[in-house]
Image: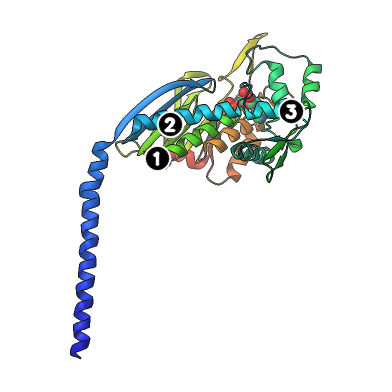
Amino acid sequence: MRGLSKSRNHFLVIVGIFIGVAVLCVVAYYGVYVPYVESHTTTNQRSRILMDTTVDIRVDARNSEELVNQAFAEIEGIEKSLSRYVDTSEVSKINAHAGQWVEVSQFTIDLVKEALRISELSDGAFDVTIGAVIELWGFGTGDYKVPSEEEIVQALKTVGYEKVEIDEAERKVRIPEGTILDLGGIAKGYAVDQASRLLRKSNAKRSIINAGGDISVIGRRPDDTPWRVGVQNPDNPADIRWILPLEDSSVVTSGDYQRYFVFNDQKWHHIIDPRTGYPARELKSVTVVTESATVADALSTAIFVLGMEAGSRLVEEMAGVEAIIVSQDGVWISPELEEQIL
Ligand code: AMP
Ligand code: MG
C-alpha cells in the first residue's frame, strides 16, 4: 500500500512538473516571443513593371526588404520562362519547335497541365493554343488590327487544346505544327502564386501581391481584419464598385477594359472566344475569388468567354470558388460572396 502511494506521489510530481513546464512555455511564447517578433516586423512595399503590367508587393516580416526583392526575382524568373514575347523562354522554345517534342522544366509541365484542366472544365472556352489568333489581332505586339474573316478561319485551324501532348516521364511538351502556345491567360496568376508561396515559406507575417489585378494575400491586415480588395466598375475603371474582404486567398479580374483598341467606333478587346476567333462580347468583367491565383486567373478568362449562364453554373459547381460576373445588362454574384461584400 505504502509503495503504491509513493509511486502515486512520484506520478503527481511528474505531472506537476510537466504542467509547470507547459505553462512556462505558453507564457514565454505569448509574453516574450510574440512581442519580440512583432517588434522586429518591418514593412516593405514596392512596385515594378513586370509581365507587361505594374506589380506591387507589400511584405511584413523581420526581413521584409529582402523578401520583397526575392518575390520580384521569382516573378521575373517566371516571366523569362513563360512569356512567348521573350525569345529564350520555354514557351518560345515550344512554339519555335512546334511539331516536335521539347524538353521543359517541371513547372512548365505543371502549368500546361493546369491550363488543360481548365480547358476541359470550361469545354474549351479557355484554350492556351489561342496564340495564332491573338497574334492576328495584334495583342501582345501592340500592332492592332481587325483581321479578315479568312485570316480568322485560317488561324482558328491551329487552335485546339486537345492536341497538346505532354510526356511527363521525359518532361516534354509537343504542340502541332502551326500552333502557337499563349499562357497569357494563366501565367500572371501562376507568378503571383509562386511569389506568395516563397513569402509563406520564408515566414512572412503578412503580404499582398498585386500584378495588374491578379491579387494574392497572406494573413490579415495589421489591425487583424481581412485585407480589402477593390473590384473596378468595368464601365468606369477609376470607380471601385465592390470591396471584398480577403484572407489567405486570391482574387483575379478579367475585363474588356484591360487591353483593347477602338476601330469603327467599336471596342476590340483581348479575350477571344476560341469558337469564333472574335472578342467574347456577352460580358464586361469577371472577378474570381479562390485560394489559388493560377486557378482564379484561368477561370476568370474562361468564364469571360463562357458568358453569364454557363459561367455562373461553372462557379456553382466548383467548391471554394466565388465570382462576380458583370454582363452588358446585369450582375451575378455568387451567394456566399454576396454575403461577404463590404
Ligand atoms: P486575362 O487578362 O487573364 O483574361 O487573359 C487574357 C490573355 O489571355 C490575352 O491577352 C491572351 O494572351 C490570352 N487569351 C485570350 N483569350 C483566351 C482564351 N480564350 N483562352 C486562353 N487564353 C486566352
Ligand atoms: Mg486570366
The kind of residue tagged 1 is Ser
User: Which element is circle 2 on?
Assistant: helix
For label 1, count other residues whose C-alpha is less than 10 Å away and answer few (under 14), some (14-19) or many (20+). some
Q: Which residue is mark 2?
A: 70
Residue at 65% x, 29% y is 91
- Are dots 2 and 1 in contact, CB under 8 Å? yes
First in sequence, mark 2 or 3: give its number. 2
For label 3, count other residues whose C-alpha is less than 10 Å away and answer few (under 14), some (14-19) or many (20+). some
Q: Which residue is mark 1?
A: 202
For label 2, count other residues whose C-alpha is less than 10 Å away and answer few (under 14), some (14-19) or many (20+). some
Q: Which residue is mark 3?
A: 97
Q: Is residue 143 left or right of residue 24?
A: right
Give above or below for 5 relative to 245: below
Find the distance from the CA under tag 2 to the CA under tag 1. 10 Å
Find the distance from the CA under tag 2 to the CA under tag 3. 32 Å
Q: Is residue 184 left or right of residue 37?
A: right
